[in-house]
Structures are given as structure tokens and as C-alpha cells.
Amino acid sequence: MQRVERFVNALSRKAGLAAGTALISMMLLTCADVALRFFDLPIPGAYEIIGFLGALAVALALAATSVEKGHIAVDLLVNYLPQRWQILLDAVSSLFGLTLFAALAWQSVLYALDLRQSGEVSATLGMPVYPFAAGIAVGCALLCLVLAAEFGRCLRRLGP
């Protein structure tokens, strides 16, 4: 089981690096567009590309952030519960998150397939939109793997 968790964590870190790359690309494109506007030479489609990259950055960062426990958690009252109850609440939380993000991943796949079939493209550049919806599905699916591993870890900690 630990081998699976290590694989999922490594995959999540790689997705996090991809998210960071998307974020840096957004920054560079924004700076270049602003600088070139000074010379009345804006980059066509910069707004579209930045929007697509932003969606990818958020989706691909989900799993890595979850592995690092970087999401906001309010555990003021939970800390006063017995250890077993805390683990049980973590398990339930992981299961709810897994269910939610599995639904999001599935619907994102369906949406990406629908966009591909309809030939939907961006307004300025005419870029296909479906790869970005598929990227969101990948990010949500990776988070599902992380949450499933967390759920399994909680069950092991609860013991028989």
C-alpha cells in the first residue's frame, strides 16, 4: 500500500510542477503582453491563453496541495476530540472529497468529449477548448487518487 501512496504522491508532485509551469507561463505572457502594448503591439489571444493556463494551474495543483496538506482546514473543535474520532472525521472528509471530485472528474471528461465532438474553439485564436477541460479532469482524478490513499491510511489507523 505504501508503494501506491508513494506513486500517487510522486505523480501529484509532477502535476504540481506542471501547475507551476502554467503559472509561470501566465506571468511571462502577461508581462510580455503589457510590455508590447506600450509599443501598440498586444499579443493576440493572450487573454484566452492566460484563462486556459489558469484553469490548468488550479486543477493540476489540487493533488499536490492535498499531499502537502496545504488546503485550509479549520480544526479548532476537532483537536479536542479523542484521537479515534479525529481519524474517523478525517476518513469521512476524505470520502466526501473523493466522491465530490470523482463526480467533477467524470463530468469534466464528459464535457471535454462534448467540446471535442462539437469542435468548440476559442474566439480569438481558434484553439480547441477540449484539451483544457480534459486537463481539469486529470487534475480532479489525481486528487481522487490522493483522497483515496488518505482514506485508506485513515482506515489502517483506525484498525480492526
Image (cartoon, rainbow, N blue to C red):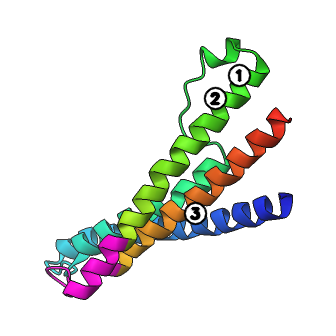
User: Which amino acid is tagged 2?
Assistant: Leu
- From which residue to which does the magenta span run? 110-130
Helix, strand or loop under label 1: helix
Q: Which percent across, then down, holds residue 156?
A: 82, 42
Q: Sequence-wise, which precedes: disc 2 or disc 3?
A: 2
In the image, which is nearer the foreground, mark 2 or mark 3?
2
| Among the 4 quarters of the image, the one containing residue 114 | bottom left
Report if residue 32 is visible in the image.
Answer: no
Tell me the CA gap for discs 1 and 3. 27 Å
Q: Which mark is residue 85?
A: 1
How many tags in the picture? 3
User: Which amino acid is tagged 3?
Assistant: Leu
Q: Which percent across, then down, holds residue 120?
A: 20, 82
* Residue holding disc 3: 142
Q: Residue at x 78, y 21 (%)?
A: 83
User: Which amino acid is tagged 1?
Assistant: Trp
Report if residue 76 is visible in the image.
Answer: yes
Q: Is residue 55 left or right of residue 143?
A: left
Tell me the CA gap for discs 1 and 2. 6 Å
Using the image, determine if residue 75 lies above or below residue 47: above
* Residue holding disc 2: 89
Q: Residue at x 60, y 14 (%)?
A: 77
At label 3, counting other C-alpha atoms closer than 10 Å, the crowd grade (few under 14, some 14-19, many 20 or more) is many
Depth check: 54 or 150 in front? 150
Q: Which percent across, then down, holds residue 43?
A: 22, 80
Q: Residue at x 64, y 69 (%)?
A: 14
Q: Are marks 2 and 3 in contact (CB under 8 Å)?
A: no
Helix, strand or loop under label 2: helix
Q: Residue at x 36, y 64 (%)?
A: 107
Residue 125 belongs to the span the image colors magenta: yes
Q: Which percent across, then down, holds residue 19?
A: 51, 65
Using the image, determine if residue 64 lies above or below residue 37: above
